[in-house]
Structures are given as C-alpha cells and as structure tokens.
Image (cartoon, rainbow, N blue to C red):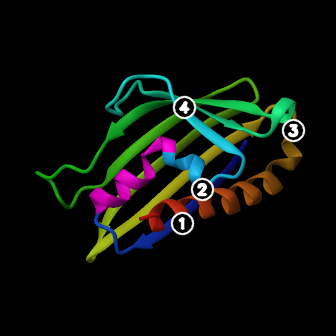
Amino acid sequence: MALFRIERVTPLSPAEAWHRLTDWKHHADVVPLTRVTVTTPPPTRAGTRFVARTGVGPAAFDDPMEVTVWQPPDPAEPGGPARCRLEKRGSFVTGWAEIEVHPSGAGSRVVWVEELRVRPLPPFLDPPLAASARLLFGRAADGLLRRP
C-alpha cells in the first residue's frame, strides 16, 4: 500500500478548518472529474458513508468510504485535536485516511495521513502512487482550506 502524509498550517480556526475538510460534498470542488454523494443522513458521525465517483463515462470508478472515527473540535477542550478516520471500502481503491486538525497559534495545523491501494497496481508502483496521491490530496487540502 502507498502511504503518504500532508501537513498544512492555516490561519483558520480549528473549527473552521475542520468544517472545510470534512464537508465531503465540497471535495468534488477540488478533485478533478469527481463528484461526491453522501449516502447516509446528516449530520456526519461515525458510520457516515459517502462515495466519490471519479472519471468520465466507462473510465470512472467509485471510491466508497465510511467514517469510522469522528472526533470534531471540542469547545470544552479547545487545545485538543480533532480527528476523523475514513475507511475506503471499494473494489478498486482500498485503504484508509486520517485527518487531524490541531490548534496552532492563532490558527490550525492540519495533518492528513492516507494509506491506499489501487487493486490492479503491483506493489512496486506504491512509491510513485504515494507521490502522485500526495500531490493530488495536497492540492485538494489547499483548495478546501482556501475556499470561501
């Protein structure tokens, strides 16, 4: 599996950074050729499921995910991190992702760690897959944190 890590510092409050990173439908705004459908009723919590469909026509694939850990910022504990874990449950893409938001000065520090496998790819392609994913998801995180 390809493992990668992204870190970003933002002037956004932890609550706002968390909201932007975990607004699943808006991930489609920053990931090319992707649309996201949340398949469970709001609000987001452990057990929330959604599908990111990426591609065009017959060259598209579904990336179904489930939130398995949901720890949003706690106003009663403002110094603590927020954490979310997603399990990728597809037949084409599997793995997991963890998003953490930590208070940092007047803003936040975001840590996104993901391990993914694209089933038809042999393990020797994991390093270039990790590098490509780091670039793609880094741009996605930047776009979500910058979005108005």
Residue at 55% of width from left, 52% of height from top?
A: 113
Q: From the image, tell me which residue sits under label 1.
A: 142
First reached walking from the N terminus: tag 2 or tag 3: 2
Task: Judge the density around disc 2: few (<14), some (14-19), many (≥20) Cα neighbours within 10 Å.
Answer: some
Question: In the figure, 91 relative to 100: above or below?
Answer: above
The secondary element bearing badge 1 is classed as helix
Pointer 2 with pointer 3, Cβ within 8 A: no
Q: From the image, tell me which residue sits under label 3.
A: 121
Amino acid tagged 2: Val
Whole-number angstrom distance, CA of label 1 to CA of label 4: 21 Å
Task: Judge the density around disc 1: few (<14), some (14-19), many (≥20) Cα neighbours within 10 Å.
Answer: some
Whole-number angstrom distance, CA of label 4 to CA of label 2: 15 Å
The secondary element bearing badge 4 is classed as strand
Q: From the image, tell me which residue sits under label 2.
A: 30
Tally of numbered tags: 4
Whole-number angstrom distance, CA of label 4 to CA of label 3: 26 Å
The secondary element bearing badge 2 is classed as loop
Of badges 2 and 3, nearer the viewer stands 2
First reached walking from the N terminus: tag 4 or tag 2: 2
Pointer 2 with pointer 1, Cβ within 8 A: yes
Q: Quadrant of the C terminus?
A: bottom left
Amino acid tagged 3: Leu
Find the magenta span and give its range. Answer: 14-25
Q: Nearer the viewer, residue 15 or 6?
A: 15
Residue at 54% of width from left, 66% of height from top?
A: 142
Question: In the figure, 1 relative to 147: above or below?
Answer: above
Whole-number angstrom distance, CA of label 2 to CA of label 3: 25 Å
Residue 73 in picture, x, y percent from top left: 25, 51
Whole-number angstrom distance, CA of label 3 to CA of label 1: 27 Å
